[in-house]
Image (cartoon, rainbow, N blue to C red):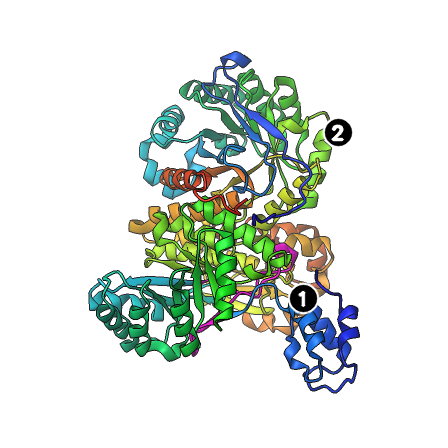
Amino acid sequence: MPFDVQFGWTTPIGDVVLGATRADGGTRRVSYRIGRGTTLPFLEDVNGSPAPLIAFEICDYPAFWSPIIRDYCGDLVNNVNEWTKTADATYGADLVRLHLTSTKQRNFSDIASIGKVVEGVLSATSLPVIIEGSNEPKIDSEVYQKCGETGQGERLLLGTAEAGKYRSIAAAALAYNHSIIAQSPIDINLAKQLNILLKEIGVQRDHIVIDPYTGALGYGFEYSFSAMERIRFSALKGDTDLAMPMICSAADTLTIKEVRETGPEEQDAAAIRWEFYTCLAAAAAGAEIVCVRHPGTIPLLRAAFADMKKEAYVTTGVP
Amino acid sequence: MALKALDIYKLLPKKNCKECGDPTCLTFAMKLAGGKADVELCPYLSDEAKSVLGATTRPPIRLVKIGVGTRNFKIGEEFVLYRHEKTFYHPPGIVFRVTDTMSEAEIVSVTKRVRDETFTRVGADLRFNGIAIENVSGSPETYAKAVATVEKVEAHLPPVLIASDPTALRAALVHCGTYRPLLHAATKENYKEMCALAKQHGCPLVIRSDSLDGLVQLAKDCNAEGAGDLVMDLAPATLGDFVRRSTAIRQLAITRAAPDLGYPVYLDTVKTGQQDAAVALGIVKYASVIVTDPLPAMSAKAALTLRQNIYTDPQKPIQMNPGIYRVGAPDKDAPVLMTVNFSLTFFTLQGYLESARIPCFMLIVDTEGLSVLTAVAAGKLSEMLVRDSIKKFGLEGEVSHRKLIIPGYASPLSGRIEEATGWKVLVGPRDAAEIGEYLHEEWKK
């Protein structure tokens, strides 16, 4: 007797395209269509949905980056183009996520330099790219405008829109046909509210990736885990304002006491394991893009995702 | 189909005799409806009522106890697919594996590690739970000797005995048969002998099959043989198999669509070849016993932390006792930082203060476990609360100055706190990560 496992889902997750190939007017060698899930993560027919994507996070001003990563990557962190190439060719990431940390410097105003950094990264890799703009209301508009313009045609994913700041990023995304990350502080209702605000100013569902915000493992990760499960659940039950793919970054996990205060000989192992546990659990809860900062985390995630997507060798009674 | 409390009440004797331990039949009915009581507690039920109630009021997943003494652990008795629907009650026992081909010294060292290793974080002691001993040699004598080696350490850890040969298990049970070990595993070939052993020693038994049909059949067969405390090994060939089967079983069990699958799940991570991944997925996807080779230190901490997170009750925020906490050995000139009693806020701030290496006082005020942002928004954090807390905990006697650093998110209250307390208020950063830099730059001035 085959078992009939009923969840009562009615609606698949919507999809979002990341990156544009030549055929679509860009220069990326690959473009990803994420989303389209019809049930809980990893439960569906193996060919039905792709494995989660792994993004490697880099920055253009490493003073604001984890010292663990600075030590591990060495001189690369001072050359964002070389770092990008390495993330693509050596670390084996699916996506590169550039944080424009240079904009965090006091009284930063050199917008032209932002354009050069983005241009450099886009020519250093032909993978789809995520760009995190500034976090300073005074320059947000110019920074996002510059990023959007420089990446025109490439179908970037721009971050990060929040309830208090989404207009300038949305304007850049709309003007140059990019998608955006919509972040809310670990709360399904706030996530929905932000998506509605974005919809009202004309950002289409298929241009939004939800970031429910990922608390550090051991310091609130359980809230993020449940927020992701609830968003996925509501989406599959038919709430189209939440039916977008999700992104999770393990960045906070590198700053917690347990990782920060590990001795130098074990610090890489600590960073890798904590990022890995965080990202794998987030993927099981519904994240379709997981972001890491330690290169050593990528092969572990890759192997785990491959094994989770493998065809079950027994099909009797297994959904 | 689950019965409602009133439907159950109709079947009860309505004597309010209190013999079940509840004051009235109605409160007993409510407990039964929630799966929190056993029908057997009522001495006056007819057999017919018992059979009707038994099937619907039993917890959908059986509670199974492994081991005896202070380190025993209980698994099962779960009710939901998502932790946010209620909570997950019984964290999985993570059990380190040794084999009977290891040296005595190795076996002893793993056993001692599980006995002694404690990882303390956010106010809780996290530990691994037991020792699995696997018969790899094929010899019952060698196996029994390995089990005896573990028991000689007198760690009193719950044992998991892994052997496909009932003769080997019988030999091992001589050494630990009274400690309620978990036996692994009954299959359709050997279940009769395995059930006889489980029954003889009163221990829980793992049933193993790679199909749900196979598990149902085995559960029925083992019940018929008198073995009731069962745990299910889904024999996954990949991590994906595990996630799919484990999720299907949880859903079928809690909806009572397949009551014969209402047992906790066992996961052997060794065979997956990816232990970290299997441990993490076991924790988030419904495993109740997780067998793993001894984890390296960093994996161990991440695994225990993930388990702690996922099995935290989402219905109640974890709170600290309000009061004054010291970081280092602060003197009368040391800074005072006020924050809320939400435990994550407390431990995050405390961690950064410790690494800043500036001795200081933390004034923890009672916001009923709300974070700074939510406490300010909900009006739980107010100038009166801060004023009363300063008085109540005797802060004025601890320091000679009258300066209070408040969290960045509490800045809207800064003026009112100054007025109410007479203390000078300094607004600190929003993010605890910046507190070290803040203290070095602002306090030292």
Q: Quick one: A245 or A112, which is closer to the camera?
A: A245
The answer to whether marks 2 and 1 mark residues whose Cβ atoms lie closer than 8 Å is: no
Q: Chain of mark 2?
A: A
Magenta highlight on residue B76 = yes
User: Quick check: can you spot residue A224?
Assistant: yes
**Residue A200, disc:** 2
> Is label 2 or label 1 in front?
1
**Residue A139, disc:** none
User: Quick check: can you spot residue B312?
Assistant: no
Q: As displayed, is residue B275 above or below residue A13?
A: below
Q: As displayed, is residue B235 above or below residue B62?
A: above
Q: Chain of mark 1?
A: B
Secondary structure at numbered mark 1: helix
Amino acid type for the residue under numbered disc 2: Glu
The overriding secondary structure of the stretch rendered in magenta is loop
State left or right for residue B30 relative to residue A32.
right
Q: Position of residue A298 (x, y in %)?
A: 39, 38
Q: Position of residue B75 (x, y in %)?
A: 51, 66
Magenta highlight on residue A177 = no
Assess disc 2: are there few (<14), some (14-19) or many (≥20) residues with their C-alpha within 10 Å of its C-alpha: few
Quickly name the residue at label 1: B56
Q: Quick one: A140 or B67, which is closer to the camera?
A: B67
Q: Which residue range is magenta in the image?
A: B65-93
Q: Position of residue A279 (x, y in %)?
A: 47, 44
Residue shown at the point (66%, 26%) measured from the top left: A170
Q: Position of residue B355 (x, y in %)?
A: 42, 56
